[in-house]
């Protein structure tokens, strides 16, 4: 009888090959990065949140071995499934590289493919995507300057407020002390008293009874003195639960998406805006445990809507940007207190607003919005021709010019113009890169 | 009639154990197999992928190429292009077999019969494995290798280690002794030697010299190595061995890395030469055992039908003009040949008596098979045992491919005139020497300019693939450190 075992390995730690994978990613880093950048440029960014199939040239990770050239010399081999061939028959070779059917020797087929395809996990994809980007001012509220505080248990103390009284500890201490100090219990006292009553009830007590009564009275007095001296609960016994304030990092962020949905914002503009929001969202999601998104669309009045409506429904009307800012502040005050939430605002517009409104926007930003925001990004969506016209940073539509004047004051404010999908990625990087430089 | 071992597809450890016992009873007492103790491990599909990427070994040193294979296999698996093997089995003592948790109970039974008895018997008895691998030592050795390489990574950096491993991997196929037994240390000796070296480092540790990489050999060791180099008679077929011993530039730890790669390569060499036999043996055994279980009333019709379904897909052989054709399926050929040996032993035709007078009709098919499993490799097995019936069943034909011609020429087919020719050609096809280039070290000027000369002895005009030749030579140059010359000569 052989001895044998069954071993259940399913609970073993996973990712045994993680080290190998990291080495592989490191090895092919340049190519993978190129492929990731390409896929960001070409593909719709809506897919970004999932893993990504990546194709890299296999040359970069080839494992060369000496092998025989399949196109040299002569060889004989055997294949199965003869149907009509007889000895001496000649079969035309299939065209080169079309190598299906007879004629592929397993050992020679090797790794002939020129492309190596595999799947990057979302994590790895985004890591590469976001490499050397930093979230602006992240440290400020979330790590260094921690304003949120949680009360955590910190053992037992002798002083505290009555609501934190630890009854069990207190009673336990009292009990121990009472035992140590031999405090007469209620039962003992009562027994004594009962006996005393009995004695008192006797109409004509004899000598012995009088003596007993006397002794009992003395004893009772002693007991009561001892009970006073050793109280049932002494201040010494009292214990309180202690709580200490522990700073906790703020791990929630809210992202306000503001967009102009008036007639001048067409499909193209909305699509560009969406990609921008998407990137910012992904970026935040990686840094914060929880990210809320609030969509505010506006024409001449602003309203909070769901994502679907935000991107796909149209509205007619004028354009008053400040209404969106008002709405944003209203929602922020109601739901997202600045001490608990990292606030990010992303505004997309075609740059037009009712005349005079730009100034009002700037005032609001300066006084109310910027002080509570981690970051404010404004993108102006132009068509390519306009982008050329406005190549100078100082010229532009009213809103752009107004923002330019106030922007330098706030390091966490960024504004950029984009015109086509391929602008987004560079712009996105520029926004954040600029900010880290200044923050540094 | 005994009670059924199981009636539905769910497996449990109790069922596994009962089924294992029933299988073992048949394997040892009926088939009279001789096996290492079994260790059976249940793993998830992800762990199976892990095992895939590192040669199926439970332990392996870290290298990016394993990560690459994992990435590819994982994608193929997730997209459904490729299923996972039902099992992986390791030539070690005890013999470790992995069962996937997704398998049904019937499949677990099949896999235990296949791996824990079929492959296990083959590993323990086949002369190549007995002679060339050390089933007891492999896991401790890999453990040593893994730790050693991890230590080198810490000490000398990932990139330095990777450089050596990459280059050694490129020469893996040229890193085996094919004909003469390696002048090897036992793994235990090697471990002891490495431990001694580490101890020496500890003892001679001097903080002042800490910043200098430790690149000196112990005196005795260097001399010992020089002696070994002088004893190597050129030409030497094992490039990695020669480089490990004689390279003028490698440091001791780098030599150790080359040796690790060489040992791993040597360990797998017998498997490359016995694919048909190994799989044939395991398939034959599981087929026999599953039927025996059914005959004994231990498994029901549902189970045997499920078994037959997967068995027939395992031994499916597409024809050469089929989309799915990718060479001869070793399971199919091995299983067919072994079943045929059994048939010839017990119920031969006149043709069989002509071809196999030694054992036709002798009845003791178990002994014939066990003798074949023990003493042959694919090439000699086919040459000895491929019968006309199997050739007819597979409709085998031999063709000649001259790269200068636009046509293949049919040399022989499955008829009386062609049987021997087909059989010889097929046997040669399984001779590794025929499709792995034969490259040898023919000269190394160790005193002078230190040039190393390699020669590829071509056969039938087949030259090295120029696409990879230069890349591999670049790796040789990296390991050797001096000029490398490569000739391609007809033998």
Image (cartoon, grey):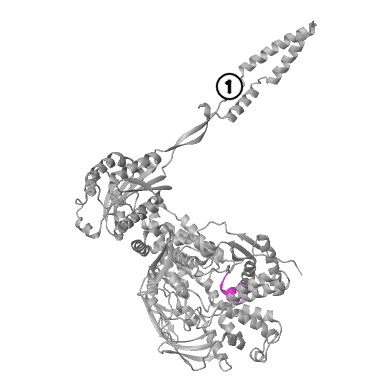
Is residue A150 in sight in this rendering? yes
Q: Nearer the viewer, residue B58 or A352?
A: A352
Q: Secondary structure at mark 1?
A: loop
Residue B143 lies within the magenta run: no
Residue B48 vertical placement versus A152 (above, below): below
Q: Residue at x 56, y 22 (%)?
A: A235
The segment highlighted magenta reads B121-134
Where residue B70 sits: x, y (%)?
48, 65
Where residue A231 sits: x, y (%)?
61, 19
Is residue A339 in sight in this rendering? no
Q: Is residue B95 left or right of residue A378?
A: right
Residue under pointer 1: A234
Q: Residue at x 74, y 15 (%)?
A: A194
Where residue B424 sits: x, y (%)?
55, 88
Q: Nearer the viewer, residue B118 or A316?
A: A316
Magenta span dominant secondary structure: helix
Q: Quadrant of residue A200?
A: top right
Residue B126 lies within the magenta run: yes
């Amino acid at each position: 009888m052989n001895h044998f075992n069954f071993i259940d390995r399913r609970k073993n730690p996973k990712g045994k090959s993680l080290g190998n994978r990291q080495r592989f990613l490191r090895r092919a880093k340049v190519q993978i990065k190129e492929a990731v950048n390409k896929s960001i440029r070409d593909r719709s960014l809506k897919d970004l949140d999932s893993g990504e199939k990546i194709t890299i040239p296999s040359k970069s990770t080839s494992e060369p071995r000496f092998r025989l050239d399949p196109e040299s010399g002569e060889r004989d081999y055997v294949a199965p499934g003869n149907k009509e061939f007889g000895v001496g028959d000649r079969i035309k070779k299939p065209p080169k590289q079309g190598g299906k059917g007879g004629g592929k020797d397993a050992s020679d087929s090797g790794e002939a493919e020129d492309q190596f395809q595999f799947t990057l996990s979302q994590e790895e994809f985004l890591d590469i995507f976001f490499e050397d980007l930093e979230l602006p001012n992240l440290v400020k509220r979330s790590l260094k300057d921690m304003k949120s505080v949680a009360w955590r248990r910190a053992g037992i103390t002798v002083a505290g407020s009555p609501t934190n009284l630890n009854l069990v500890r207190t009673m336990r201490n009292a009990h121990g002390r009472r035992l140590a100090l031999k405090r007469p219990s209620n039962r003992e006292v009562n027994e004594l008293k009962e006996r005393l009553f009995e004695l008192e009830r006797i109409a004509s007590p004899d000598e012995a009874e009088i003596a007993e009564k006397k002794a009992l009275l003395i004893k009772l007095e002693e007991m009561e003195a001892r009970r006073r001296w050793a109280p049932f609960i002494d201040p010494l016994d009292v214990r309180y639960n202690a709580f200490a304030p522990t700073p906790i990092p703020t791990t929630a962020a809210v992202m306000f998406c503001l967009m102009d949905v008036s007639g001048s914002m067409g499909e193209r503009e909305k699509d560009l805006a969406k990609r921008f929001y998407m990137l910012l969202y992904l970026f935040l999601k990686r840094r914060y445990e929880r990210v809320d998104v609030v969509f505010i669309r506006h024409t001449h009045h602003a309203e909070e809507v769901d994502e679907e409506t935000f991107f796909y429904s149209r509205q007619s009307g004028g354009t008053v940007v400040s209404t969106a800012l008002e709405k944003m502040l209203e929602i922020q005050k109601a739901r997202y207190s600045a001490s608990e939430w990292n606030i990010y605002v992303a505004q997309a517009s075609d740059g037009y607003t009712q005349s005079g409104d730009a100034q009002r926007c700037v005032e609001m930003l300066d006084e109310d919005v910027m002080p509570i925001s981690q970051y404010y990004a404004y993108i102006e969506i132009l068509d390519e021709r306009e982008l050329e016209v406005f190549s100078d940073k100082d010229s532009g539509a009213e809103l752009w010019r107004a923002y330019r004047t106030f922007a330098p004051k706030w390091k966490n404010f960024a504004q950029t113009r984009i015109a086509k999908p391929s602008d987004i990625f560079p712009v996105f990087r520029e926004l954040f890169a600029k900010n880290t430089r200044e923050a540094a | 009639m005994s009670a059924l071992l199981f009636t539905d597809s769910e497996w449990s450890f109790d069922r596994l154990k009962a089924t294992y016992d029933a299988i073992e009873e048949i394997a040892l007492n009926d088939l009279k197999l001789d096996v290492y103790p079994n260790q059976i491990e249940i793993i998830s599909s992800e762990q199976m992928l892990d095992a895939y990427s590192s040669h199926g070994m439970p332990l392996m040193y870290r290298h990016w190429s394993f990560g690459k294979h994992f990435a590819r296999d994982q994608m193929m698996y997730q997209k459904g292009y490729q299923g996972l093997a039902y099992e992986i089995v390791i030539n070690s003592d005890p013999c470790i077999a992995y069962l996937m948790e997704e398998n049904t109970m019937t499949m677990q039974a099949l896999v235990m019969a296949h791996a824990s008895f079929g492959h296990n018997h083959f590993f323990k008895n086949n002369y190549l494995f007995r002679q060339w691998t050390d089933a007891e030592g492999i896991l401790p050795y890999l453990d040593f290798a893994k730790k050693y390489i991890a230590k080198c990574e810490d000490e000398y950096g990932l990139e330095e280690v990777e450089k050596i491993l990459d280059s050694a991997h490129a020469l893996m196929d040229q890193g085996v002794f094919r004909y003469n037994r390696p002048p090897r240390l036992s793994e235990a000796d090697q471990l002891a030697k490495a431990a001694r070296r580490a101890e020496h480092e500890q003892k001679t540790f001097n903080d002042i010299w800490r910043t200098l990489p430790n690149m000196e050999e112990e005196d005795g060791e260097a001399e010992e190595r020089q002696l070994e180099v002088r004893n190597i008679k050129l030409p030497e077929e094992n490039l990695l061995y020669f480089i490990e011993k004689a390279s003028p530039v490698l440091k001791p730890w780098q030599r150790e890395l080359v040796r690790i790669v060489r040992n791993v390569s040597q360990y797998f060499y017998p498997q490359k030469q016995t694919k048909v036999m190994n799989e044939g043996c395991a398939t034959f055994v599981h087929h026999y055992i599953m039927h025996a279980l059914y005959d004994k009333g231990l498994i029901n019709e549902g189970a045997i039908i499920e078994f037959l379904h997967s068995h027939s897909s395992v031994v499916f052989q597409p024809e050469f003009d089929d989309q799915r054709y990718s060479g001869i399926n070793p399971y199919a050929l091995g299983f067919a040949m072994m079943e045929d040996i059994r048939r010839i032993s017990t119920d031969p035709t006149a043709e069989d008596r002509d071809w196999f007078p030694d054992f036709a009709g002798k009845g003791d098919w178990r002994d014939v098979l066990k003798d074949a499993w023990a003493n042959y490799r694919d090439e000699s097995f086919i040459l000895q045992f491929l019968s006309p019936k199997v050739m007819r069943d597979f409709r085998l034909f031999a063709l000649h491919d001259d790269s200068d011609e636009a046509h293949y020429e049919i040399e022989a087919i499955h008829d009386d005139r062609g049987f021997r020719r087909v059989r010889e050609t097929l046997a040669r096809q399984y001779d590794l020497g025929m499709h792995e280039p034969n490259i040898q070290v023919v000269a190394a000027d160790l005193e002078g300019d230190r040039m190393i000369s390699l020669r590829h002895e071509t056969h039938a005009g087949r030259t090295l693939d120029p696409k990879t030749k230069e890349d591999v030579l670049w790796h040789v140059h990296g390991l050797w450190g001096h000029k490398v010359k490569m000739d391609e000569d007809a033998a």
